[in-house]
Structure formats: structure tokens, C-alpha cells
Amino acid sequence: MGAIIFMVGILLITHGNLGQVLAENAYHILGKTWPNLRTLSVDKSDEPDMTRGRAQALIDELDDGGGVVVLSDMLGGTPANVASALIRAGRIETVCGVNLPMLVRALSYSGQSLDIVVSKAVTGGLEGVVYVIPGEGNGQERG
């Protein structure tokens, strides 16, 4: 019998519909849907304990044995605070500052181990933030 293959689950916990929009754009870029991706929208009126319970239910649904990485938008915000409360080292990890390059990278490597997915998500997010100098190959003239 073959080896069991685990996928790292990816949960986006974000303000408003940011997570859903990021997920839709990742689907567009990568050309497929991802069964190991879920989103949780947080509104300022949501109770943190209720949100944490909803997040835990999604994590339980996503974790097939490979672990879950929770991507959140802004450190210090309610989504990040909820995500941080869910951390279980080696099983559930959290990265704040999600952007589209981070999500695409996390999805692309989600067949790897949790620590690799976390590392690739962080580097993807960092490498996706670039200051574009006017006139440096972007079609803009200085002036």
C-alpha cells in the first residue's frame, strides 16, 4: 500500500472579505481550486470568542494530518489575535501580513511539510513587496 499523502491546510482569517478576494485571485492565477483552503471573514462587531470557535472548526476540517497554516492580514488586529490564539507549535502555525504572493506560494507548496509551507509563505510575502523605481523598466518616464 502507498504512503499517505498529507496536504497542509491553509486558513485565511482577515478583516472583511479580503481573504475571499485573495482566494479568488489565487484560483485565477493558479488555474485551479484548492480543497485545502478556507477563508474566515471577521467584522468589527464579531465576538472574538465566537470567531475563535469558527476558526477552530475550520482548522479541524482542514487538518488531514499535515497541519494548518493560518494567514492573517494585520498584526494586532482581531483576525491576527484570533489566529495567534490558535497556534499549536508544529500543528497550527500563524503568519501575519498576508498578501497575494504569500498565498500563491503557500498553496503551491502545500503538499510539502508545514515548516516548509510556513517558510515559503513568509518568503513569498516578503519577495512580493517591491518598490518600483520610476523609469526602471515599468514604462514610466521620470519627470
Image (spheres, rainbow, N blue to C red):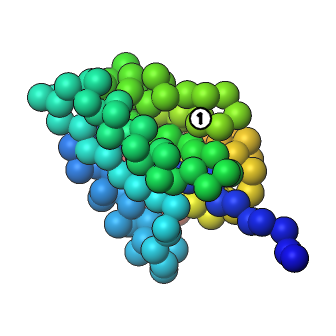
Residue 109 position in % (x across, y down): 67, 59
Kindly identify which residue carries mark 1: 93
Q: Secondary structure at mark 1?
A: strand
Tell me where residue 52 appears, x and y as whole percent.
35, 30
Q: In the rendered picture of this protein, how many numbered marks are placed on residues?
A: 1
Residue projecting furthest to the right: 1
Q: Residue furthest bottom?
A: 31
From the viewer's perspective, tell me whether residue 90 is left or right of residue 83.
right
- The residue positioned 84% from the left and 68% from the top of the image is 3
Residue at point 32% right, 40% down?
54
Q: Give the image location of residue 71, x and y in percent.
A: 47, 41
Instruction: Name the amino acid, label 1.
Output: Glu
Q: Is residue 117 left or right of residue 85?
A: right
**Furthest residue in direction front, as rendered:** 1
Image location of residue 34, percent across then percent down? 49, 69
Q: Residue at x 63, y 46 (%)?
A: 67
Count residues near mark 1 (Cα–Cα under 10 Å), then give few for <14, some for 14-19, many for 20+: many
